[in-house]
Amino acid sequence: MGIPGLEAAHFLISIPFSMFYIVGLLGNFTLLFVVWKEKTLHKPMDLLLCMLALTDISMPTSIVPKALCIFWFNFKGITASGSLTQMFFLQAASVMQSAVLVTIAFNRYVAICNHLRYATILTDAQIAKLGLMGLARAVLFLLPLSLLRSRLPFCANRIIPHTYCDHMAVVKMSCGDITVNRTYGLIIRTVLRISSKKALNICIAHIGVILVSYTPFLFSSQFGQGIALHVHIILANLYFLLAATLNPIIYGVIMKKLCDKVGKYTCTM
């Protein structure tokens, strides 16, 4: 449905949506390009930032193109398989992002508290293993959820009051017993919440990323009972858009070496 109650403003709303998306893509692809080109940036923290950039590309890409189709062309339909695919990639990227943020927090902890052993504790191979573990965690968490959703029978009313296929919005349309789906979804949300708490550390950049990533999520999911539906939907979208847009800027400003390299390639283009 897009944003119910604000249908007349869909085109205007699409302007900041598309701008956030484009700026986020440019920032994250620039970060990936600069780290790939510069051998001096092939350090654990830089590799972790590349993983974060990949999740920041994946999450908004899972929702923004479809949302813009609703805003611009009023294309509101989506197949059942398309809905499941969108939810899987969106949630997998979200779970992967939480794993990367925890790993970045651990990386900063080792760099500050165990500086002399940093190079031996966090090697490039170790970072690659942690990244693969995060990816495996996301897939293993969400495959059962996807299978549970695919087996649900749906009622005649198949209207989702949202810009994307939110898990609970889809599950609530089912005519069957959704107790298992609710319980499993709650477990995943709890794990993500624990991960985000562990990721809080003394680094200014990282605290900024955590605040940007999770503040809209908290207001849309934890404190959203008393707010209007359209505000809830906008906050839910900001959760995916803001972090993807601001993460490269936050880390680029704080990490001088990365900022200098980005400036070097920007000036030569």
Image (cartoon, rainbow, N blue to C red):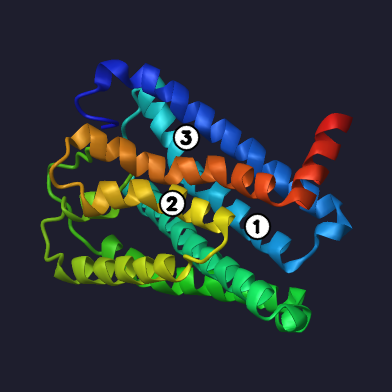
Residue 216 in picture, x, y percent from top left:
35, 46
Q: Disc 2 or 3, which lies upstream in sequence?
A: 3
Position of residue 217 measured from the top left corner of the image (x, y, whole percent)? 34, 50
**Mark number, residue 49:** 1
| Numbered disc 2: secondary structure | helix
Q: Are marks 2 and 3 in contact (CB under 8 Å)?
A: no
Q: Which quarter of the rendered picture does the C terminus lie within?
A: top right
Residue sitting at x 28%, y 38%:
233
Depth order, front residue of 71/56: 56
Amino acid, disc 2: Leu
In the rendered image, which quarter is residue 206 located in? Answer: bottom right
Q: In the image, 175: left or right of 205?
A: left
**Residue drawn at 47 percent across, 41 percent down:** 242
The answer to whether one can see residue 103 in this image is yes
Q: Decide: few, some or many residues near mark 3? Use Cα within 10 Å; few <14, some 14-19, many ≥20.
A: some
Mark 3 or mark 1, earlier in chain: 1
Q: Report helix, strand or loop for mark 3.
A: helix
Q: In the visual, does 76 lie left or right of 208?
A: left
In-front residue for pair 235/182: 235
Amino acid marked by disc 3: Pro
| Labelled disc at residue 229 | none
Task: Residue type at mark 1: give it.
Answer: Leu
Residue hosting label 2: 211
Pointer 2 local density, CA inside 10 Å: few below 14, some 14–19, many at least 20: some
Q: In screen coordinates, is 252 left or right of 237?
A: right
CA gap between label 3 and label 1 equals: 24 Å
Nearer the observer: mark 1 or 2; the answer is 2
Determine the residue positioned at 79% across, 47% down.
34
Q: Nearer the viewer, mark 3 or mark 1?
A: 1
Residue 65: which numbered mark, if any?
A: 3
